[in-house]
Image (cartoon, grey):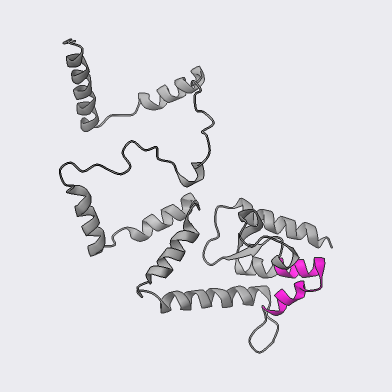
Amino acid sequence: MNYQKIYDNLIDRGRNRDHVDGYSETHHIVPKSMGGHKTDPKNLVELTAREHFIAHFLLAKIHGGNQWHAISRMRGNDGFYINSKLYEVARKKISEAVSERFKGVPKSAETKAKMSSSATGKLKSPKSVEKTRQALIGRPATPQQLACLALGRTRPEGYVSPLKGKKRETPWMVGRTPSNKGKKASDETRAKLSAIRKDRKQTPEQIAKRVAARKATLESQGRTH
């Protein structure tokens, strides 16, 4: 049996999907004990608990030696053997229990800083964004959130945003030059954009804003039409 091919197919499946539904675990493609990088995204893949168990079993079959220790650490507390299905169920139940235990418990500033640091630069899949949006629907805003909203709507006179005049870049664009910078759109691209905008109706506010901008331009040029 070609265990390496099975392992490669398992890793490719984990890499090519948007996200894992429910509980997942991070797997080091090249084990740390074999020189694999601990934090390099290229060496990490999200797997289900069952896939994670199978992945380590395949690594043990391929390389032997200390790779069997990873399998031994997936045994129960009493040392009895636990298969991939039982391991997945156990890990899910543990995750649910921990989540319920800390539900509603305020996080320390240190914990929040660690969570923010680990999430910086990571992109959420569309499914993950939609899941978060659905979870927030109907949830009342906290006093802190309301205070932030009120502050944003009642800025003092003369307030200048610290971002004004600064180029805003998303985390994955920092240090990179857009591939279309300085390039003119082709006739085909312009035609597509025109077709998209053709049937798009403007709101009354957009129309009023466009009319006001046109009037201001004419007045500055001493024209009336």
Residue 67 screen position, x and y as percent:
76, 71
Quarter the N terminus occupies? bottom right
- At 79% from the left and 59% from the top, the residue drawn is 4
* In this picture, residue 25 sits left or right of residue 189: right
* In this picture, residue 24 sits left or right of residue 68: left
Reply yes or no: does residue 54 show up in magenta. Answer: no
Reply yes or no: does residue 58 show up in magenta. Answer: yes
Prevalent SS, magenta region: helix
Callout count: 0
* In this picture, residue 56 sits left or right of residue 153: right
Residue 63 vertical position relative to residue 194 in the rendered view, above or below? below
Say if residue 53 shows up in the picture.
Answer: yes
Say if residue 141 shows up in the picture.
Answer: no
- At 19% from the left and 20% from the top, the residue drawn is 216
- Answer with the quarter of the image where residue 44 lies: bottom right
Residue 170 vertical position relative to residue 217 in the rendered view, above or below? below
- At 22% from the left and 17% from the top, the residue drawn is 217
- At 80% from the left and 62% from the top, the residue drawn is 3
* In this picture, residue 157 sits left or right of residue 161: left
Q: Nearer the viewer, residue 153 or 10?
A: 153
Residue 27 screen position, x and y as percent:
64, 64
Residue 111 screen position, x and y as percent:
43, 69
Residue 224 vertical position relative to residue 135 in the rendered view, above or below? above
Quarter the C terminus occupies? top left
Q: Which residues are magenta?
A: 55-73
